[in-house]
Image (spheres, helix red, strand yellow):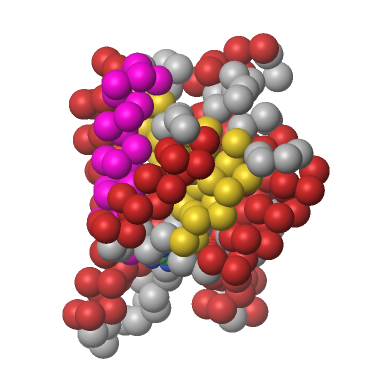
Amino acid sequence: MSEQNTIRAPRIAAITGGGSGIGEAVVHRLAQAGCRVAILDIQLEKAKALAGQLNAQRADCALAVSLDVSDVQSVDAAFRAIESHWNAGVDVLVNSAGIMPVASVLECPPEMFRKAMDVNVVGTFACSQRAARGMVERRFGRIVNLASISSERAGVGRVAYGTSKTAIVGLTRQFAMELGSFGVTVNAVAPGPILTPMTEKNYTPQTRQAFESSIPAKRMGTTQEIADAIVYLCSDGAAYVNGIMMPVDGGYLASGIATTAGLKA
Ligand SMILES: NC(=O)c1ccc[n+]([C@@H]2O[C@H](COP(=O)([O-])OP(=O)(O)OC[C@H]3O[C@@H](n4cnc5c(N)ncnc54)[C@H](O)[C@@H]3O)[C@@H](O)[C@H]2O)c1
């Protein structure tokens, strides 16, 4: 990795959903890169446990903050808590908080659809807007949103989740366009299937098998592989990358039919 592709420390990074899964892996990677990490999660106990572990390695490098991304007042209170703790604003924001409700198009209750929108889309919007105000003032910022392969491909039972993840791609472009001239980049990473508490709950062995056979890499991804891509987008060297959706999916979105005239992938 070149010098440019590192993160100038000490930067302050806020990771929503930082207590679990992909967010947790990002917390570890950004802390290793020398950032101070604010671990924001609705599951405060998980965030506290992780902060305690990191602070034992490097004093005051981590802060656990309770946050419900779908509540604008909670978002403001969480950012205030970070600003007063370190007496500085957030330079890097990773929006990893999310939920994956599953229901068919014929049966999805409107409240379930609305909740997916509130947490995944309004939550990403509210945290990004709150963080971006300070980033624009300081003329530096990195925001990374969690899109998904479901942003681009429909899946059975994913009307609420998939629609919310498609919206994340649009939101990313809107923010990128308006903030780019202030040294603030806004990008999205679209993970393929990754084993985390979210997918453990929702994937049957058949779902997993269907993914593994259709992904060119023939396997699910790891939280570290997603965190590595996110950390690149947070680095100084990624200053000219703005408004993209980067698939990190073992080739899933690139792939099509797996057999032609007797040839097989
Ligand atoms: N795991 C995958 O295969 C996969 C694939 C594509 C995209 N993603 C996206 O990556 C992100 C992280 O997913 P994950 O698999 O690590 O899930 P996860 O369930 O392990 O982690 C999600 C975290 O978000 C937190 N959270 C949920 N609602 C919240 C709220 N209202 N306010 C604050 N925090 C809240 C949870 O407490 C949890 O700690 C999500 O946005 C998800 O859609 C995951």
Locate residue 105: give its quadrant. bottom left
Q: Nearer the viewer, residue 14 or 241?
A: 14
Point out the residue furthest to the right here. 57
Left or right: residue 125 versus residue 214 is: left
Left or right: residue 101 versus residue 257 is: left
Q: At 66% from the left edge and 39% from the top edge, which residue is drawn?
A: 61
| Marker count (numbered) | 0
Instruction: Give how far across and how far down residue 67 sits, in percent.
Output: 42, 60
Left or right: residue 91 versus residue 204 is: left
Point out the residue furthest to the top here. 3
Instruction: Give how far across and how far down residue 194 sits, in percent.
Output: 61, 59
Q: In the displayed structure, would residue 104 be above or below residue 28?
A: below
Quadrant in the picture for the N terminus: top right
Q: Look at the image and give the residue range highlighted in magenta.
A: 119-140
Locate residue 232: give its quadrant. top right
Instruction: Give how far across and how far down residue 32 sits, in percent.
Output: 72, 35
Q: At 35% from the left edge and 53% from the top edge, which residue is drawn?
A: 77
Q: At 41% from the left edge and 26% from the top edge, which residue is drawn?
A: 141
Instruction: Give how far across and how far down residue 220 sits, in percent.
Output: 65, 58
Q: In the displayed structure, would residue 197 be above or below residue 73?
A: below
Q: Is residue 121 magenta?
A: yes
Q: Is residue 59 magenta?
A: no
Q: At 43% from the left edge and 38% from the top edge, which residue is drawn?
A: 83
Type of secondary structure dominating the magenta stretch: helix
Q: In the displayed structure, would residue 61 be above or below residue 216?
A: above
In this orientation, does residue 82 appear? yes
In this orientation, does residue 257 appear? no
